[in-house]
Amino acid sequence: MTDQRRPSAGVARRSETSRRAVLTAAFELAAEVGYAKLSIEGIAARAGVGKQTIYRWWPSKGAVLFDAFLMFAAGEPGGGVGGEGGGEPGEEAALPDTGDIEADLKTVMFATVDELNDPRYDRTMRALSIEIAHDADLAALYAERLDRPMRELKKRRLRAAQEAGQLAAGLDLDVAVDLLWSPLLVRWLHREGPLTHEYAAALVETALGGMRP
């Protein structure tokens, strides 16, 4: 008869300790050596685990780095990609809603600017952006675990403003999200100019100018 008992608490704790060690190692090494030189071997050595331990939990170094980024972003107060609060948004996550859609969007956009400018995340996020463009599996993982949930949070806040009469009733919320956030991310990724609160505020004001009733 197969033993169906669950792993002991000690084993579970060791597994979680190893997992966090791997993610920490991946995050640190990506910042130190860059994605091109990042390797499963290097991560394993830094984390003090065997390569097979990593391959048992992740299919590629890109997947390891993605989880590492989520772990570190979730650990920062108000963190998370785009400043929405947490690396993997759950059901309780939400954008601020003070009743003033312009002020709330600026709060979130300013947090996004601060995160993108943070040297602790910049190199890792750039590496992930490049890898997502070349790895279909990682792109699907990113869409499922981060992009779609975050987009829904943004649309939920815009929908509330729409229902309050602050945005046009026929506004396409997916297009609205793109108009607000895409220019910010493109400027950061392509280093087209300084990423500042002033630029983010101008984006919000300009976009809302075409979205109001």
Image (spheres, rainbow, N blue to C red):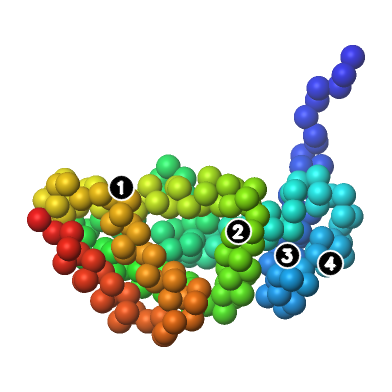
Q: Nearer the viewer, mark 2 or mark 1?
A: 2
Look at 81% across and 45% down and name the residue there: 56
Residue 132's tag is: 2
Instruction: Say whether disc 2 or disc 3 marks the residue closer to the N-terminus.
Output: 3
Instruction: Say whether disc 1 or disc 3 marks the residue closer to the N-terminus.
Output: 3
Disc 2 versus disc 4: distance between alpha carbons? 21 Å
Q: Residues within 10 Å of mark 3 (few under 14, many from 20)?
A: many
Look at 68% across and 67% down and name the residue there: 27
- Residue 145 shows in this picture: no
Q: Is residue 182 left or right of residue 202?
A: right
Question: Disc 2 residue type?
Answer: Ile
Q: Quadrant of residue 25?
A: bottom right
The residue that mark 1 highlights is 156
Instruction: Say whether disc 1 or disc 4 marks the residue closer to the N-terminus.
Output: 4
Question: Disc 4 residue type?
Answer: Gly
Residue 26's tag is: 3
Q: Nearer the viewer, mark 2 or mark 3?
A: 2
Question: Disc 1 residue type?
Answer: Arg
Element carrying mark 3 = helix
Question: Disc 3 residue type?
Answer: Ala
Instruction: Say whether disc 3 or disc 4 marks the residue closer to the N-terminus.
Output: 3
Element carrying mark 4 = helix
- Residue 5 shows in this picture: yes
